[in-house]
């Protein structure tokens, strides 16, 4: 996929396009309730066009046209008001957008996990914005390298789900729970890994598998038993929260909604283990909100699936200091690093050392270039912190 032209002189694509690293599997029907955008044929290319219309400025931010009234129920009068939401406001919003994910014992097996495939991305609907210097030139590509085994020493894993038309997968990270220190059951991923966005419903059969393929038993096309693929168990999502921006505006393309493309899941072991996810994995990482951009050196981690990868190995890109990418200059610019990881790495954590030297999560993979030269993720600030605080306190 050719690189995106991100010069301050022109907000136009050079030889290629931007895509959303969507992860809905088009491998056949399932009982899921999400709506997955149909993928284009392999090799299809399209140029980006400007984002369409709006209902007018609301809180300094223009909402797109055609949003169903039902999606807006419980939304603040302006996006700016969202930064002032309290627990009760998030609770009210969640009550109008219910997540239902009953445990189905033994639903996920090696065959279903192996059949789940990220969909090819649809063409983008928006061009990167360069007004005000919010979009930088694209960084140099960085080649992904394998993460050393065992993966049980990592907070990373894979998310699997059922969507309308098939099964999909993403990458994800075990993060610290501010309300339950040392006993976290929280997992951070991308919003498009739990919900398709505008007009859709939460995905079904949503689970997290920490240390997926820890031993390498399924590497190289080999078949492996579930105990080898999921050495630390299969953890079903009990509660999920994503940004209202993603739920209302999101879709299968790269645009302003991806500037809030994050999600947090509360999970439980399907075998009713007394240990928390953090205790089972052996650790969890803190989330560094409002991390100073000039102090961040980011490493993205994930399970890329498309060639030259196969979705069975954990990879990382040490991308250094992120550049900026924005579709709406009134929203926090996304972080961008050079990286050749492909679809499947969606939702994977971006890690950076804090001033005390400890690693923290600063973003998650959301979109990338069609030439697999860079990845971009949301900048985590007030809205993301509120979402984590809500799900941490949610009973």
Image: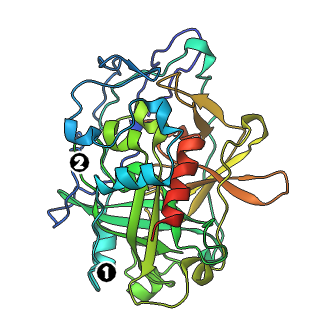
Which numbered disc flags the more N-terminal residue, 2 or 1?
1
Q: Position of residue 107 (x, y in %)?
A: 26, 80
Q: Residue at x 35, y 29 (%)?
A: 124
Q: Are marks 2 and 1 in contact (CB under 8 Å)?
A: no
Which residue is label 2 attached to? Answer: 200
Check the image and tell me how it is coloured.
Answer: rainbow
Q: Please say whether residue 42 is visible from this viewpoint.
A: no
Who's the residue at 49% across and 54% down the image?
87
Residue at x 54%, y 41% (from the top left corner): 378
Please, is residue 275 above or below residue 133 in the view? below
Task: Give whichever of 164, 84 is nearer the camera.
Answer: 84
Local packing at callout 1 (Cα closer than 10 Å; few below 14, some 14-19, many 20+) is some
Q: Nearer the viewer, residue 363 or 185?
A: 185
Q: Secondary structure at mark 1?
A: loop
Q: Which residue is mark 1?
A: 109
Q: In this view, which residue lies farthest toward the top?
A: 9
Q: Is residue 39 left or right of residue 229?
A: left
The x, y position of residue 179, in whole percent, is: 61, 68
> Residue lying farthest right?
356
Q: Is residue 93 above or below residue 220?
A: above
The quadrant of the image that shows the C terminus is bottom left
Nearest the viewer among 199 and 341 is 199
Q: Is residue 377 left or right of residue 123?
A: right
């Amino acid at each position: 996929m050719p690189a995106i032209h991100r010069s301050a002189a022109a907000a136009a694509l050079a030889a290629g396009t931007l895509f959303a690293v969507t992860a809905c599997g088009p491998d056949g029907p399932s009982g899921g309730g999400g709506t997955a955008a149909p993928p284009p044929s392999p090799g299809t290319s399209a140029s980006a066009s400007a984002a369409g219309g709006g209902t007018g400025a609301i809180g300094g931010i223009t909402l797109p046209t055609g949003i169903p009234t039902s999606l807006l129920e419980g939304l603040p009068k302006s996006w700016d008001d969202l930064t002032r939401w309290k627990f009760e406001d998030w609770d009210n919003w969640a009550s109008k957008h219910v997540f239902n994910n009953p445990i189905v014992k033994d639903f996920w097996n090696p065959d279903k996990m192996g059949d789940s495939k990220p969909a090819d991305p649809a063409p983008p609907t928006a061009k990167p914005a360069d007004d005000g210097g919010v979009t930088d030139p694209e960084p140099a590509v960085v080649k992904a390298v394998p993460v050393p085994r065992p993966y049980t020493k990592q907070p990373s894993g894979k998310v699997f789900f059922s969507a309308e038309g098939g099964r999909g997968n993403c990458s994800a990270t075990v993060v610290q729970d501010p309300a339950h220190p040392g006993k976290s059951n929280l997992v951070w991923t991308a919003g498009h890994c739990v919900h398709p966005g505008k007009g859709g419903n939460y995905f079904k059969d949503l689970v997290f598998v920490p240390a997926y393929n820890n031993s390498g038993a399924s590497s190289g096309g080999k078949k492996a038993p579930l105990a080898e693929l999921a050495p630390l168990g299969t953890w079903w999502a009990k509660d999920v929260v994503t940004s209202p921006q993603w739920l209302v505006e999101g879709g299968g393309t790269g645009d302003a909604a991806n500037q809030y493309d994050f999600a947090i899941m509360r999970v439980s072991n399907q075998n009713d283990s007394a240990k928390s996810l953090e205790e089972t994995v052996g650790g969890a990482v803190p989330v560094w909100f409002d991390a100073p951009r000039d102090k961040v050196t980011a490493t993205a981690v994930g399970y890329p699936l498309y060639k030259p990868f196969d979705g069975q190995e954990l990879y990382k890109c040490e991308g250094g200091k992120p550049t900026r990418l924005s579709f709406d200059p009134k929203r926090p610019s996304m972080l961008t690093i050079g990286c050749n990881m492909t679809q499947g790495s969606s939702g994977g954590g971006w890690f950076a050392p804090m001033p005390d030297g400890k690693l923290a999560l600063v973003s998650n993979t959301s979109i990338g270039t069609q030439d697999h030269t860079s990845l971009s993720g949301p900048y985590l600030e007030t809205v993301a912190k509120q979402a984590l605080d809500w799900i941490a306190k949610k009973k």
